[in-house]
Image (cartoon, rainbow, N blue to C red):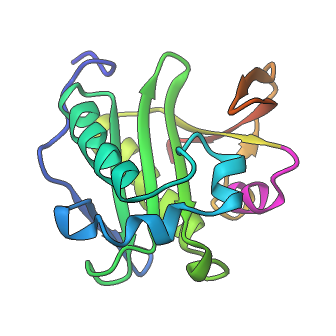
Amino acid sequence: MNSTTASFPERIELSGEGLVLRDWTEADLSAMPELFDHPDIAYWTPIVSPFDAAAARARLDRDRQMREEGKTILLAITVDGGAPLGEVMLRRAPEGTELGYAIGPAHRGQGLAARAVTVMAAYAFEQLGAEQVILELEAENAASVAVATKAGFRLLDVPLITGEEKGRPYALQTWGLSRP
């Protein structure tokens, strides 16, 4: 199986670490702006800003398209399968299996990101056969560095990924977690 083109399941629900990671649904559209329309998310992530109802619809549609193409999975982070508190992403990229996350401002400080990354990494290792998962983040993003550390990732000795997004330059470090 080619790990860069194999399709993902049509539906995914993962449980662990006191969380349920589930597919985004039409019912979540109204909750998405509250989670993603925030200056921190606009600054540190590629998520569109401002994030309104139209952006929520476009994100859900794009999520479904990327999953169908076998490229990316976006799952809502919940504690019980109900209300979304944030999002965790798994992306098949040339540089490896990349994870990412965004937690709604009202739900930060509960360890949701580290727990969601741990659950998604286990899925990547057990179901997708990944040997390593990576996080790409800016060194100045102290909250993300803390998530990486708490989830057991180590800073890799690889070149920084540089570029520009939303009119600002960035330099991403690569953090890795190897298959247990």
Image position, residue 163 (x, y; %) = 74, 20
Q: Between residues 178 and 169, which one lies in front from this camera angle?
A: 169
Image position, residue 94 (x, y; %) = 49, 16
Q: Residue at x 67, y 81 (%)?
A: 109
106 horizontally vs 170: left or right: left
Image position, residue 82 (x, y; %) = 27, 81
Q: Residue at x 20, y 62 (%)?
A: 25
Residue 4 sits in quarter: top left
Q: Which residues are magenta?
A: 139-148
Q: Residue at x 63, y 60 (%)?
A: 151
Q: Identify the image quadrant of the N terminus.
A: top left
175 horizontally vs 159: left or right: left
Which residue sits furthest left? 10
44 horizontally vs 168: left or right: left
Above or below, 58 against 53 in this view is: above
Above or below, 180 against 69 in this view is: below
